[in-house]
Amino acid sequence: MEYGICPLSMVPVHQSADDTSGWITQLLYGEVFKIPETRKHWSRIRTPSDQCEGWVRNPQIFRLDPSEYEALCTPEGIRIASDLISHICTQEGLLMPIPVGSSVHTTTALSHTHEGSVFLPESGKDSLIDTALIYLNSPEVKGGRSPFGIDADGLSQMVYRTVGVMLNRKAPEQASQGSPLSFIEESEPGDLAFFDGPDGVINHVGLIMRDNYIIHCDGKVRIDRLDHTGIFNTEKRTYTHPLRVIVKVL
């Protein structure tokens, strides 16, 4: 088994070893991964936190030895960049912008230094909505995990990551990672609401806010109304996502 780290601001993880294939997810700076398979131009990678797997172009990978990888995978000392944009200083003294959510405890493996602020995991559930609001108006991009393109599952995953909770990549899997609630009235800000697609399978997620609002990604990261029926889009004046279940993770 080989191991690697993302040395760039953002790297797409493709469904197949082909530039034209869709994105499964996106690696942000400093994230580490396993490399089960390597080809001439592409490598199949697997992220340890959520077991998400796909293909990355080889020039976008920095290889690690097993001991480096294991040291960087320990939960102690994890630091996540909290500025919308901060900077990495390379060994050559060059600056590279990185987005909020990047892993900056891994900079030493790349001989980099981070210039910016980090989230405090001990801030807990009270900080979740403030963090989600950083992404407000970010465009929807399937497979994205940054403020320059994100999807609904990526939003919930990245927000919870800042308090040390690693959610799975896709909404149906995230729905099984907490305790279901019977009524919206039992929920607190930061709890997750999941919604059904046309086939009756969960395909959407958002973070519950106060006063029956929800922040989620639909075209862009936006705030809409939430009730027992589902999400009421305040611009279209119609329900867009039927409510399936509310889950308390923290």
Image: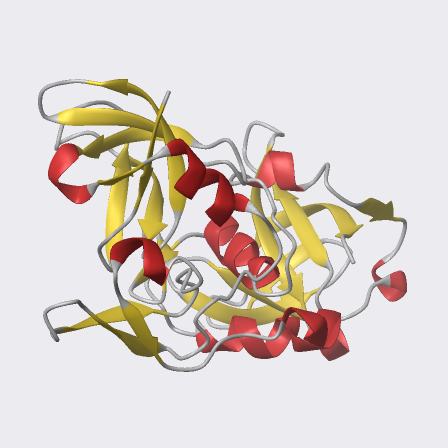
Quadrant location, the N terminus = top left
Whether residue 87 is visible here, answered yes or no, is yes
- Residue shown at 34% from the left, 35% from the top: 65
- Residue shown at 32% from the left, 63% from the top: 139
Q: Count the labels in the image.
A: 0
* Front residue of 75 and 220: 75
Task: Tell me if 183 is positioned left or right of 6 in this view.
Answer: right
Residue 63 percent coordinates (x, y): 25, 38
Task: Tell me if 235 is positioned left or right of 232 in this view.
Answer: left
106 above or below 134? above
128 above or below 219? below
Residue 148 percent coordinates (x, y): 29, 65
The answer to which quarter of the image holds residue 187 is bottom right
- Residue shown at 54% from the left, 33% from the top: 198
Task: Tell me if 234 is positioned left or right of 32 in this view.
Answer: right
* Front residue of 46 and 155: 46
* Front residue of 170 and 111: 111
- Residue shown at 69% from the left, 41% from the top: 175
